[in-house]
Amino acid sequence: MKKILIAFMSVLVLAACDPLTDLNVDDKNPSAVPAGTLFANSTVELMDFMSSCNVNVNNFRLWSEQWSQTTYPDESNFQLVERNVNGRAWNTLYATVIKDARAAKAIMEADQFLSADNKRAQGAIMEVVEIFAFHLLVDIFGDIPYTEALDTDNLTPKYDDDAAIYADLATRLDAAIEGLNVPSGLGSYDIIYGGDSDAWKKFANSLKLRMAIRMADMDNAKAKSMVEAAVSSGVFSSSADDFKISYQGSTPNTNPVWESLVQSGRTDFVGSNTLIDVLNNLDDPRRAAFFKSNIVDSLGNVIYVGGEFGNANSYPDNSHPGALLEDPTLPGAIMSFTEVNFLLADAAARGYSVGGTPESFYDEGVTSSFSDWGVSGASAYLANPDVAYATAPGNWKEKIAMQKWIALYNRGFEAWSTYRVYDAPTMNVAVGAGILPPPRFTYPVTEFSLNGESVQAAAAAIGGDSFESKVFWDMN
């Protein structure tokens, strides 16, 4: 993982100019790290984890059935333990993202040279990153350590109820949003928004919108209040607002997808028949951006073929992840204007006051996705009776789920979450496992050896540590 950032490098260069006093410093184990450096590392680790397609790190593109595998289809059959995939997600979010965000906040608060306004805004930004990470942990696992998490004096933290955690995260998010009304002064240490408090406020409100829609089927009144407050305060209004990192053309700062698809020299992934069959049926122009294909039919036309999900597929006989994904500088986005539009379409369909209709937001979500991928023809695509909001098959949830799931290509976690929220679109049963995508990750094996009593209690509370148990908001 990339741990050395441009901002940190500038600090080291300046430090290298100091005279002989440097000889008395253990530069391998620095006694003090700037708050900004820790915060930057927290965000890089978050972005790398969410962007990666390395099967040891992130299997969400497989769990959402956007991709299939070739020689080794274990992860397409939802095997987590062999490569410790659940443990890596757990450790990355707790031990790096949350830990570094908290440490950065503590150092920042002790900085006597920062103004009160800067401290307020920086604290709010660091808080939003921690909230986002906890939200991911809940969405992945369900009940997790929260109130006692990362307490160095407590090596066996209790697990908290996932619904209660979400409620507390929402309260904390409101406080953070209030703190973003002043300049942050983070500057280049903020590799996402360059210290722009207004941009972070839009992201925080968009996260609030996402969390509200997640739990709308469980608590409609609470969700309505959260959504309308978020929209009133300001959510993403264009793709320029996307929560994303800009990667570079040379290692170690390249997009992790490039590392797996190009740098590794491996041919592990092909498009899934689950997604490609849908794209073919809708004659979706985004096929050529999402995938590349050397397969031709009898008339000489290039066609797109998806590998059977959960099978060991032939790489030459199926379509491959698209050329755009082979760009080392491709930005890694983990929340977008496209997603926000589909969230607003859902909210409007529920009768929330969000300033538009389900159809208008739905259309904008599709159009934004086309733009993101550099594809033309959104208007003609939306005129297709199988795509148009008024005539597309299914109820309003199924219409939104289908187009949102497509638009979230290369955003595996959110595509999988969309399937769990709506129980749509229809997924394929994995060939080897014989099941549909599970609704949660099981707990890491290490938790049973290091925190056995707590994790056993958590497993009992959610109905067992199994693929059948669900996160609290998964009502389908």
Image: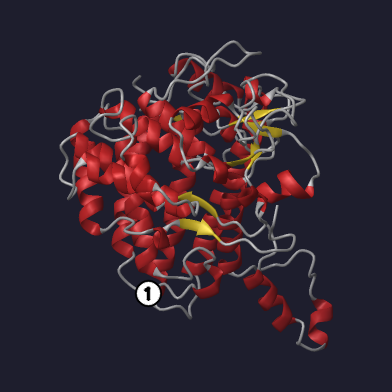
Q: Is residue 337 above or below residue 240?
A: above
Residue at image location 38% in from the left, 52% down from the top: 337
Left or right placement of residue 126 versus residue 202 in this view? right
Q: Position of residue 213 (x, y in %)?
A: 30, 37
Residue 210 visible in the displayed image: no
Of residue 288 and residue 92, the one placed in the foreground of this image is 288
Dot 1 surroundings within 10 Å: few (below 14), some, or many (20 or more)? some
Quadrant of the rendered image containing residue 466: top right
Quadrant of the rendered image containing residue 239: bottom left
Circle 1: element type:
loop
Of residue 409 and residue 468, the one placed in the foreground of this image is 409
Q: How many marks?
A: 1
Amino acid type, mark 1: Pro
The residue that mark 1 highlights is 183
Q: Position of residue 194 (x, y in %)?
A: 48, 70
Residue at image location 57% in from the left, 25% down from the top: 273
The image quadrant where one finds the C terminus is top left
Residue 470 visible in the displayed image: yes
Quadrant of the rendered image containing residue 202: bottom left
Left or right placement of residue 207 versus residue 271 in this view? left
